[in-house]
Amino acid sequence: MSCEGCKDGAGFDLPITMAFQPIVDVANQTVFAYEALVRGKDGAGAGQVLSQVSPDNRYAFDQVCRTTAIDLAAGLDMTADGANLSINFLPNAVYEPRACIRATLAAAMRTNFPLNRIIFEFTESEAMDAAHILNILRSYRAMGFKTAIDDFGAGYAGLGLLALFQPDIVKLDMALIRDIDTDPVKRTIVRNTLNMLRDLGVEPVCEGVETLAEHDVLRDLGVTLMQGYLLAKPAVEALSPVSWPRAAQPLAHTA
């Protein structure tokens, strides 16, 4: 299987690597997954690297991110304790899902990385054809990958897409989590979003957790999967140790 879009376009010449940030299960004190975050080999941050991505080279960039993440994760023995690898992908860099996945499959086969330990997460940073997104997500699920919507509540990937496809995971945007301990409106929004996701059988992840107070409110709302600087910062080509917060105490202000 092939597609014309995979053949066209420029290569991505900037050398990259990956930093890995844990997504942790705070109830069981285990690492659920490590998200692969792009970095430049020269120390450039994600913003600097992404500024070099254009419509001409985004396919090549997306492909090298996938294979680099898998190669590094395998070398770090990421799945030894049951953790998953979460890879961000660009929907507009995927032309035909089963054709554009070949490099990913080859990397997984070369490194003996199990496909069912790979999560593909995406953020719709621009409006896209819903049918195209659904084709990608359904194809990835059929191939054995897990799927996730990132930054839920911030981008175009909202309730409309969720009504058509229920991924394995939805990551609530950090803007909803920031200061949730002092913002009753955010608590209401998050509490009802969590209830909706649970009713749909979707696992919620709260990202951007930076304070113990935020952590405690989320625990009180029943959240177990979290990501953020309170727990661990990204580590370049390494697996960060997790700083486990103290046991959460029941809170009175969950309205």
Image (cartoon, helix red, strand yellow):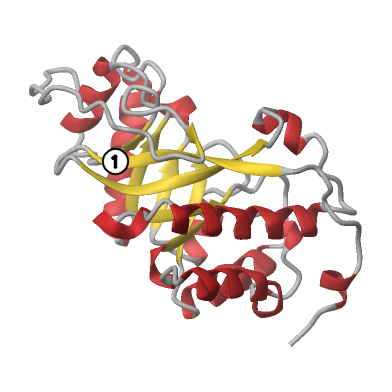
Q: Which kind of residue does numbered mark 1 sit on?
A: Val
Query: Which of the 4 quarters of the picture holds residue 116?
Result: bottom left
Q: Residue at horizontal 74%, vertical 38%?
A: 50
98 displayed left or right of 48: left
Q: Position of residue 154 (x, y in %)?
A: 56, 36
Q: Is residue 230 left or right of residue 58?
A: left
Quarter residue 14 falls in: top right
Q: Position of residue 232 (x, y in %)?
A: 36, 28
Q: The N terminus lies in which quarter of the figure?
A: bottom right
Left or right: where 242 falls relative to 62 = left
Residue 136 screen position, x and y as percent: 61, 70
The extreme top residue here reads 182
Q: Quadrant of the C terminus?
A: top left
Q: Residue at x 47, y 33 (%)?
A: 235
Whether residue 181 is situated above or below residue 238 in the rendered picture:
above
Frontmost residue, 255 versus 131: 131
From this view, report whether residue 98 is shown above or below residue 155.
Answer: below
> Height in image: 231 above or below 30?
above
- Is label 1 in a helix, a strand or a loop? strand
Give whichever of 210, 135 is nearer the camera.
210
> Can residue 121 be seen at all in this image of the molecule?
no
**In the displayed structure, would residue 188 be above or below residue 17?**
above
Q: Nearer the viewer, residue 121 or 107?
A: 107
Q: Residues within 10 Å of mark 1 (few under 14, many from 20)?
A: many
Tag 1 residue? 24
- Whether residue 158 is visible to the viewer of this picture, yes or no, is yes
Residue drawn at 11 percent across, 18 percent down: 252
Residue 222 percent location from the top left of the image: 19, 39
Asked where in the image residue 53 lies, by quadrant, the reply is top right
Q: How many marks?
A: 1
Q: Residue at x 20, y 34 (%)?
A: 221
